[in-house]
Image (cartoon, rainbow, N blue to C red):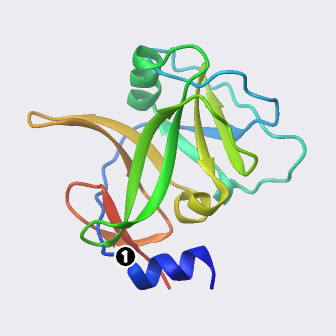
């Protein structure tokens, strides 16, 4: 049974959507010696593409300007924001964000303006084509996955979603 099918069977559901100016990230094949930490960065349109694979636009992950800026503020050299998808939440699957310095064999690395995110291959299937944003609200500040083409619907807080079958 595939990872995705197991998650569909055992997971709850949820997600939210907002409109922000975004910039596209492409994967980078260069070995990454450090993980990115949340820090401020300029909003230039630098793009790095992994030459060893032919990625389609749907396989890319886009970062909003607010996400890049916040990552530049909080990340230390050698750190990345890891995005993972797990079963759980009120809609079936939930997004998990953490700072990480380790890059695994099956991880995809996306870098923009000196900050980077990593996504394992299984989770990438659930977030490819999405936009990652940082939102500051009165009651909380958080990273969120927006405009996820793999999600059928999600919860109002944006931390969980259900997938299109």
Instruction: Give x and y (percent) for residue 128.
Output: 59, 58
In the depicted structure, whether residue 60 falls above or below residue 80? below
In the depicted structure, whether residue 121 falls above or below residue 142? below
Residue placed most toward the observer, 5 or 25? 5
Is 130 displayed left or right of 47 in the figure? left
For the point 59% across and 25% down, which residue is it? Answer: 35
Residue placed most toward the observer, 82 or 129? 82
Is 72 displayed left or right of 78 in the figure? left
Hey, which quadrant is residue 23 in on the image? top right
Bin the neighbour count of mark 1 within 10 Å (Cα to Cα): few under 14, some 14-19, many 20 and up.
some
Instruction: Give x and y (percent) for residue 78.
Output: 61, 19
Hey, which quadrant is residue 67 in on the image? top left
Q: Residue furthest right?
A: 52
Residue placed most toward the observer, 94 or 111? 94
In the depicted structure, whether residue 128 falls above or below residue 135? below
Q: Residue furthest left?
A: 138
Is 97 displayed left or right of 128 in the figure? left
Total numbered labels: 1
For the point 50% across and 38% down, which residue is it? Answer: 63
Is 133 displayed left or right of 57 in the figure? left
Instruction: Give x and y (percent) for residue 8.
Output: 45, 81
In the depicted structure, whether residue 93 falls above or below residue 82? below
Instruction: Give x and y (percent) for residue 25.
Output: 63, 38
Which residue is identified by label 1? 11
- Quarter that holds the N terminus: bottom right
Q: At numbered mark 1, what does the secondary structure look like: helix, strand or loop?
A: loop
For the point 62% across and 26% down, which residue is it? Answer: 45
């Amino acid at each position: 049974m595939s990872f995705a099918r197991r998650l569909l069977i055992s997971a709850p559901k949820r997600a939210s959507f907002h409109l922000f100016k975004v910039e596209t990230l492409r994967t980078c094949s260069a070995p990454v010696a450090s993980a990115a930490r949340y820090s401020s960065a300029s909003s230039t349109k630098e793009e790095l593409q992994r030459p060893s694979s032919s990625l389609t636009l749907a396989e890319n992950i886009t970062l909003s300007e607010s996400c890049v800026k916040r990552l530049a503020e909080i990340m230390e050299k050698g750190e990345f924001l890891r995005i993972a998808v797990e079963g759980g939440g009120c809609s079936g699957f939930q997004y998990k964000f953490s700072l990480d310095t380790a890059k695994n064999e099956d991880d995809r690395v996306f870098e923009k303006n000196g900050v980077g995110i990593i996504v394992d291959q299984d989770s990438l299937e659930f977030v490819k084509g999405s936009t990652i944003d940082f939102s500051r609200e009165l009651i909380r500040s958080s990273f969120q996955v927006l405009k996820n083409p793999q999600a059928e619907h999600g919860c109002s807080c944006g931390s969980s979603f259900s997938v299109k079958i």
